[in-house]
Image: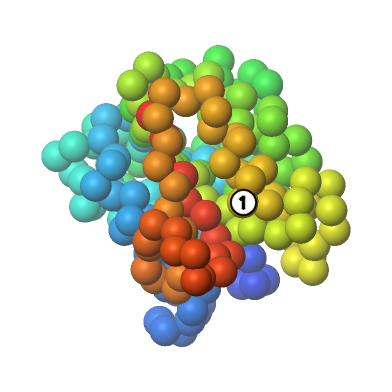
């Protein structure tokens, strides 16, 4: 079977993009930002083409013993298996909003969720699934672009909605701790009053 994916502007396919493409660099930067936090059994929810799982498996080979990459699109999972295969990585087709997903996948020490929550209809169900799959003391690293708010239209054709910074922070109230960072290009920083930020990154401990 020959799998040919096309870059649509949302689906990141590094091998089809210019190395200095800004969106590609931003996505890769999120994985590099997360790498120091990653250990144990790892879930990358909406893993896409698998480049991030492969990066983590290579960089954290001593700290990670298994990585599960989940994506809703079967062709993308097949592509990931072909292009970004690694002995510690398993790619699985699955829906992030499936209420049975925690029973199917089990518990994780680390969960990654980059630029996913803006694509789902029910962000509360999505967060509940992630919380259920995270071990006590486990860590969640989640990013999202900011926008007009839950239920409000967005100019991005693939986004259901984009949360406000306040709505984004409210997603993590039941975690024992949460640190908020903001992404500008390939850099991450704590908030400054004189800067408007478009992407938030939360690092949470259950």
Residue 6 showing in the rendered view: no
Q: Nearer the viewer, residue 189 or 138?
A: 189
Residue name at image x 66 percent, y 43 percent: 167
Q: How is the image coloured?
A: rainbow
- Quickly name the residue at label 1: 165
With 62 as the anchor, is 139 left or right in this view? Answer: right
With 40 as the anchor, is 136 left or right in this view? Answer: right
Residue name at image x 29 percent, y 40 percent: 38
Residue 89 showing in the rendered view: yes
The number of discs equals 1
Residue 107 lies in quadrant:
top left
The quadrant in which the C terminus is found is: top left
Helix, strand or loop for disc 1? helix
Residue name at image x 14 percent, y 39 percent: 62
Report the residue that reaches farthest toward the left: 62
Residue 192 lies in quadrant:
bottom left
Residue 71 lies in quadrant:
top right
> In the rendering, at what x and y percent does residue 189 appear?
37, 61
The quadrant in which the N terminus is found is: bottom right
Question: Can you say whether 123 is above or below 154 in the image?
Answer: above
> In the rendering, at what x and y percent does residue 173 appear?
55, 28
Disc 1 residue crowd, few under 14, some 14–19, many 20+, Cα 10 Å: some
With 136 as the anchor, is 1 left or right in this view? Answer: right
Residue name at image x 48 percent, y 81 percent: 21
Question: Can you say whether 126 is above or below 143 in the image?
Answer: above
């Amino acid at each position: 079977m020959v799998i040919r994916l096309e870059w649509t502007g949302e689906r990141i396919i590094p091998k089809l993009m210019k190395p200095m493409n800004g969106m590609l660099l931003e996505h890769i930067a999120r994985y590099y930002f997360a790498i120091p936090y990653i250990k144990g059994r790892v879930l990358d929810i909406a893993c896409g083409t698998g480049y991030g799982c492969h990066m983590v498996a290579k960089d954290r080979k001593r700290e990670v013993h298994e990585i599960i990459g989940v994506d809703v699109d079967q062709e993308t999972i097949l592509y990931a298996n072909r292009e970004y295969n690694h002995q510690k990585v398993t790619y699985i087709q699955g829906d992030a909003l499936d209420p049975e997903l925690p029973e199917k996948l089990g518990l994780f020490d680390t969960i990654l969720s980059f630029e996913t929550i803006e694509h789902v209809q029910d962000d509360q169900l999505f967060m509940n699934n992630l919380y259920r799959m995270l071990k006590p003391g486990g860590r969640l690293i989640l990013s999202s672009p900011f926008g007009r708010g839950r239920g409000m239209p967005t100019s991005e054709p693939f986004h259901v909605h984009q949360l406000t910074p306040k709505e984004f922070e409210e997603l993590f109230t039941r975690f024992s701790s949460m640190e908020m960072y903001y992404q500008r290009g390939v850099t991450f920083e704590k908030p400054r009053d004189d800067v408007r930020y478009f992407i938030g990154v939360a690092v949470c401990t259950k």
